[in-house]
Each structure stands twice: as structure tokens, then as C-alpha cells.
């Protein structure tokens, strides 16, 4: 008897496979428990057959059936009944297919990459970096811990961050494309519906169907129709415009003047024209027009001009203030744009002063200007005897002079303060005397430069030096004595007897009867004329010779001179470029100025 090695069932001795389990050549010969051939006998006992004859009869019809099935399988595989594989080949093929399937690689599951995936990886790397850092700080490194390893982790983390950023960017692009496609489909459909709406409302029934047609259209697109006025198909189609306003001023107040709603950044507005007003502390208000198209996202840039306020206090208070580089008339506390300004302050009887000032945004710039007073008195036209019978040769002959025109003469000599306010310097030898002391150490040329600059400063040509005749006429003040009005020199001026070897503040001694101070002493005073001999006859409005090398300056004497030199008739002369610590001057104004 022969039994299958795999399942133990009895099979035919010549069979190449077991019909019960299909195992090929897996048979053991066994008879009465003995081994067949060289193979050992089965270690199990075969099933006991109740009837050997019945069993053999069954095998007679099972084998043909198996053969038919095997042929059918071969036919199906090869597609041809004429080239049938053997049963052994079929079994071998089945076994090979099974092994192939076993060796077939299992496809990995598709990994879904998301923002969370990158985030988790970054968190994990960060945790590794911090853990390694802690171990290195505590001196308990693990295998593989090193600065190099930490650097690699840091680089990997940075790369992962870049991947995350790129992933987010790509997601946005994809989302934007998707939204764009959806919006394009929506707009295409909406355009068609709007066309149908227009066709209806423009038809002969449109007047009565306008409300119904709009209601139908709006109900189909409720979100887009929200807030849209009935019939405004442009806004329905393209949406509300979105307005933003940028400005250079912080905390600016922005208003839309032709609507009731208050402005806010990104506010929705229907297409049209709008008037914006921008206000901010420290800036000049500005209004601009903005035109919006339906669906437009517009950012308007409106830059304001920064301003400040300017305050000018003056002495005297009645002085007038003018901004030389600004068109508007000055008002105290007026608003001006930020920048530099030239402020001019003037008053009658004072030297005009100009100051530069810079006003910043939001600043309240305050300046104070005290004008230097230059007081003048009016000298009436008249006649007098010029010269002295008992004086020096250059004071003779005494002759009658008539001045046909009145003029204004400065009541004092030009002071150091007045000189500084015009020229910006102080050439005086006696600087310590103070701003009210006469300026000295100035030449005739210096005096003329002062006059030119003062005239420019005040925009006039009214200031000048007196002629020699004008000076003596004013000094005498209607008298014919050595000192005005028969007063003593000590009462009227500073000479070598009472000066203490220096100049003194102007206006300290007694004035003559016409209100002029220091006509005797303190400093010599330059006159306009060239030095020349007196005429023998009467003259009117003399101006001295037309040629000569010396200017008359020796009028009035000085702190350094004797009483003789301080007489009303005394004359002296210097070169126009000569400077000395007892040389000064005073001004006159022509009549009518």
C-alpha cells in the first residue's frame, strides 16, 4: 500500500501527486509497516479502511474527473486545448505564482504631508537640540552628543522650517487657484443672469417687473446681493470696492465727506467718487477726491504737510512782525508748515531786526525780539552863523548858512548795541562799557557800511550821515555860545576833565534845547563832508567841497579831549579809513522819512 506523506491518505503507486491534497511526489511506500525502497516507513498509522474493495471502486471514477479538471484548467491558462500542460506543470505553475506573490513587495501607505507633519518634525528636532544642550551643559553627554551633532540638528531644523514655509506658500497658491476658478465660474453664471435681468427690465414689461426681476436675481445670489441697492448690477457682479488710506501722519482722522458712515480701513463702498478729509495734530488738513470701481481694492496715499505754530513777542509791543519768506500776513500763533522762516520786526524809532527761526511739526515755536531804539528829533529849517570869530583858523570866516529843509537827527550817538544789531560785531575799544555806550573805533568807511546795511535791513535809503552844517546847526540849537544854550561843558558832556579816561553811556548828560544828547564830548562824530575852507559869503544847504582827501569828523570833541576841542564850532578831520577809540557817529533822516 502507498500513502501520501503530507496527508496520510492512500494513493495509487504510479500516481505523481496526491488527489486528496495535491502534493506532488510526496509519497511513502508502506506495506505492513515496512519501508518501501530507501525511504523510511511512515511514523503514523494509516486509516483503517472498512472495505478495501469499495475504496478501489471509488478511485476508478475520481481519477478521470481529476484529469478532466486539470485539462480544463490548462485550457483556460493556455487558451488552447491542443497544447495542454501536464498536471505536474500546472502544479508547478501554481506553486511559482504563490512564491511570486509572497515575494511581491507590499506598497507603502501614502504619507499625507501637512502643516502639522512639518510642525511635529520641527518640534521633535527642537526637543532633541534642547535635550542635547542640557546634557552638554550638565556634563552628562550620551553617545553621539557633540557640537557637530547639534549643528547638524540645527541645520536640519532650519531646512524643515524652509520646507514648512514652502508648503504653506504652495497651499496658498493652490487655494488661490481653486478660489479663482470657483469665482470665475460664479461670475460667468452671474453675467448670464445679469444679462437676462437687463433683458427683462428693458423689455416692454420691464417697468412693472423691475422689482420682481431684482428680487429673483438677488435671491439666487444672497451673499453678493447683501447691501447692494436694487438695480446696481455692477456692484452685484463685481462686488463692493474696498478702500484703505495710508498717510504719513500718526493717529490721523480720516472722513468720507459724502457718506454718513464713519471711515474704517478696508471699508466696503459701491463704485463711485468720494471726497476724503485727513486731519492730524501737527499737520495741515487735506481733502482729496478718490474714484472707486466696483470690486476694486484701492489704497489711497495721502501725505500731509506738517505744521507748527509761531509766536513772536516784541519790545516794543507795538512793533510790526513780518515773515519774509511766507505770503500770509503774520498773526500771533499762526499755523505754518514745518521749515525755516525769517522773521522781521520793525517799529518807528527802532532799528529793524530780522531773526531766523525753524518750526518743527507740532511745535509751538516762540521767539522774543527786543528792538534797539534809535530815537530821532525833528530839526526845523532855519539859518545860523556858522564858525567862530575867536576860534581856530579853520573856523573862519563866520558866515551865514541857511538850511532850507528840515531833517531828523538821532538824539544820541550810535551805540554799541545798535551797531551789533545791524553788523553782528562790536569793534569798540571800550566793550565793557556796555550796549548803551557809544560805538567807537570806527572809520568813516565803517560808518557808511553800517548805514548801507541798515537801509537794506529796513528796505529804505533814509539813513545817512549829517552834513557839517547840519551838525553845527543842531548842536547850537539856536545859540551862539561855545556850548549849547550857554551851559557849561561839565553839564552837557564828557571830556578829559570828567570822563575818567573812558566813554560813558549815552544820554547821561543834559540835552540841548532841541533834545540832543552828547553833542559835546564822549566821542568825535563823523560828518558826510570833505574838509574844506569856509566860504566868505552866505550859503544855502552847503555840502562841502567836491574834492579832497579828508573827511570832517572832529565835531563835538571826545572823552579824551579838552574843553576847547568840545566847542560847537570846533572842526577836525581824519582820513576816511582811520579808526580810533574816540571816533564815533550819529545818524540823520531826510525830511519826510
Image (cartoon, rainbow, N blue to C red):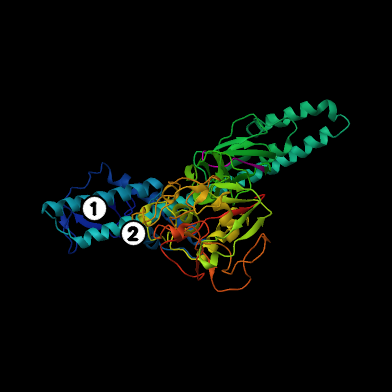
Q: Judge left or right: residue 223 versus residue 483.
A: right
Q: Which residue is mark 1?
A: 129
* Label 2–label 1 contact, CB within 8 A: no
Magenta stretch?
Answer: 281-289
Please tell me which residue lies in front, 571 or 107: 571
Q: Judge left or right: residue 32 versus residue 452.
A: left
The quadrant in which residue 533 appears is: bottom right
In this rendering, is residue 455 above or below 579?
above
**Image depth: mark 2 or mark 1 in front:** 1
Q: Secondary structure at mark 2?
A: helix
Residue 246 visible: no
What whole-number distance in Å separates the C-alpha atoms at marks 2 and 1? 41 Å
Please tell me which residue lies in front, 288 or 403: 403
In this rendering, is residue 301 above or below 567?
above
| Residue drawn at x 50%, y 54% as measured from the top left | 482
Q: Secondary structure at mark 1?
A: helix
Residue 27 image point, x, y percent: 25, 57
| Residue drawn at x 64%, y 48% as measured from the top left | 380
Q: Earlier in the sequence, mark 2 or mark 1?
A: 2
Number of marks in the rendered image = 2
Residue 413 image point, x, y percent: 49, 53
Q: Which circle marks residue 103 in the picture?
A: 2
Few, some or many residues within 10 Å of mark 2 (<14, 14–19, 20+): few
Q: Residue furthest front?
A: 390
Few, some or many residues within 10 Å of mark 1 (<14, 14–19, 20+): some
Q: For residue 294: magenta? A: no
| Residue drawn at x 28%, y 46% as measured from the top left | 52
Q: Judge left or right: residue 190 versus residue 345.
A: right
**Quadrant in the picture for the N terminus:** bottom left
Please tell me which residue lies in front, 249 or 63: 249
Amino acid at each position: 500500500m502507498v500513502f501520501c506523506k503530507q496527508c496520510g491518505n492512500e494513493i495509487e503507486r504510479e500516481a505523481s501527486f496526491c488527489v486528496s491534497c495535491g502534493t506532488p511526489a510526496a509519497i511513502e511506500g508502506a506495506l505492513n509497516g515496512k519501508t518501501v525502497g530507501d525511504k523510511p516507513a511512515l511514523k503514523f498509522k494509516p486509516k483503517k479502511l472498512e472495505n478495501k474493495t469499495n475504496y478501489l471502486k471509488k478511485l476508478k471514477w475520481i481519477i478521470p474527473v481529476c484529469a478532466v479538471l486539470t485539462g480544463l484548467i490548462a485550457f483556460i491558462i493556455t487558451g488552447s486545448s491542443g497544447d495542454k500542460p501536464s498536471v505536474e506543470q500546472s502544479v508547478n505553475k501554481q506553486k511559482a505564482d504563490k512564491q511570486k506573490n509572497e515575494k511581491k513587495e507590499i506598497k507603502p501607505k501614502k504619507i499625507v504631508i501637512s502643516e502639522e507633519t512639518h510642525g511635529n518634525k520641527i518640534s521633535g528636532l527642537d526637543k532633541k537640540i534642547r535635550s542635547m544642550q542640557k546634557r552638554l551643559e550638565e556634563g552628562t553627554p550620551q553617545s553621539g552628543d557633540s557640537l557637530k551633532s547639534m549643528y547638524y540638528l540645527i541645520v536640519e531644523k532650519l531646512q524643515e522650517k524652509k520646507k514648512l514655509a514652502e508648503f504653506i506658500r504652495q497651499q496658498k497658491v493652490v487655494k488661490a487657484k481653486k478660489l479663482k476658478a470657483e469665482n470665475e465660474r460664479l461670475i460667468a453664471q452671474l453675467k448670464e443672469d445679469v444679462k437676462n435681468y437687463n433683458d427683462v427690465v428693458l423689455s416692454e414689461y420691464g417697468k412693472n417687473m423691475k422689482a420682481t426681476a431684482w428680487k429673483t436675481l438677488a435671491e439666487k445670489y444672497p451673499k453678493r446681493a447683501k447691501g447692494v441697492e436694487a438695480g446696481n448690477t455692477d456692484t452685484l457682479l463685481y462686488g463692493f470696492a474696498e478702500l484703505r488710506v495710508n498717510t504719513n501722519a500718526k493717529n490721523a482722522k480720516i472722513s468720507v465727506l459724502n457718506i454718513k458712515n464713519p471711515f474704517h480701513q478696508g471699508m466696503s463702498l459701491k463704485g463711485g467718487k468720494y471726497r476724503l478729509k485727513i486731519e492730524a495734530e501737527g499737520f495741515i488738513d487735506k481733502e482729496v477726491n478718490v474714484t472707486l470701481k466696483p470690486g476694486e481694492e484701492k489704497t489711497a496715499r495721502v501725505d500731509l504737510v506738517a505744521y507748527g505754530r509761531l509766536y513772536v513777542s516784541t519790545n516794543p509791543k507795538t512793533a510790526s512782525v513780518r515773515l519774509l519768506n511766507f505770503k500770509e500776513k503774520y498773526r500771533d500763533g499762526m499755523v505754518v508748515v514745518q521749515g525755516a522762516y525769517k522773521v522781521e520786526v520793525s517799529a518807528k524809532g527802532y532799528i529793524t531786526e530780522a531773526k531766523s527761526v525753524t518750526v518743527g511739526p507740532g511745535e509751538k515755536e516762540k521767539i522774543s525780539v527786543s528792538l534797539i531804539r534809535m530815537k530821532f528829533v525833528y530839526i526845523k529849517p532855519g539859518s545860523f552863523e556858522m564858525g567862530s570869530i575867536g576860534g581856530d583858523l579853520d573856523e573862519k570866516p563866520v558866515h551865514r548858512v541857511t538850511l532850507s529843509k528840515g531833517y531828523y537827527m538821532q538824539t544820541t550817538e550810535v551805540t554799541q548795541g545798535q551797531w551789533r544789531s545791524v553788523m553782528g560785531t562790536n569793534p569798540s575799544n571800550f566793550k565793557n562799557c556796555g550796549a548803551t555806550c557809544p560805538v567807537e573805533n570806527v572809520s568813516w568807511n565803517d560808518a557808511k557800511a553800517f548805514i548801507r546795511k541798515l537801509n537794506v535791513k529796513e528796505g529804505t535809503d533814509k539813513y545817512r550821515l549829517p552834513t557839517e552844517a547840519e551838525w553845527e546847526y543842531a548842536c547850537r540849537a539856536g545859540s551862539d555860545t561855545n556850548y549849547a544854550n550857554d551851559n557849561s561843558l561839565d553839564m552837557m558832556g564828557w571830556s578829559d576833565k570828567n570822563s575818567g579816561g573812558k566813554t560813558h553811556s549815552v544820554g547821561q548828560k543834559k540835552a540841548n534845547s532841541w533834545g540832543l544828547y552828547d553833542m559835546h564830548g564822549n566821542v568825535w562824530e563823523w560828518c558826510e563832508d570833505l574838509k574844506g575852507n569856509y566860504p566868505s559869503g552866505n550859503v544855502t544847504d552847503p555840502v562841502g567841497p567836491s574834492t579832497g582827501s579828508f573827511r570832517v569828523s572832529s565835531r563835538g570833541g571826545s572823552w579824551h579831549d579838552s574843553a576847547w576841542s568840545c566847542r560847537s564850532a570846533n572842526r577836525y578831520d581824519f582820513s576816511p579809513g582811520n579808526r580810533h577809540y574816540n571816533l564815533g557817529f550819529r545818524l540823520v533822516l531826510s525830511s519826510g522819512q
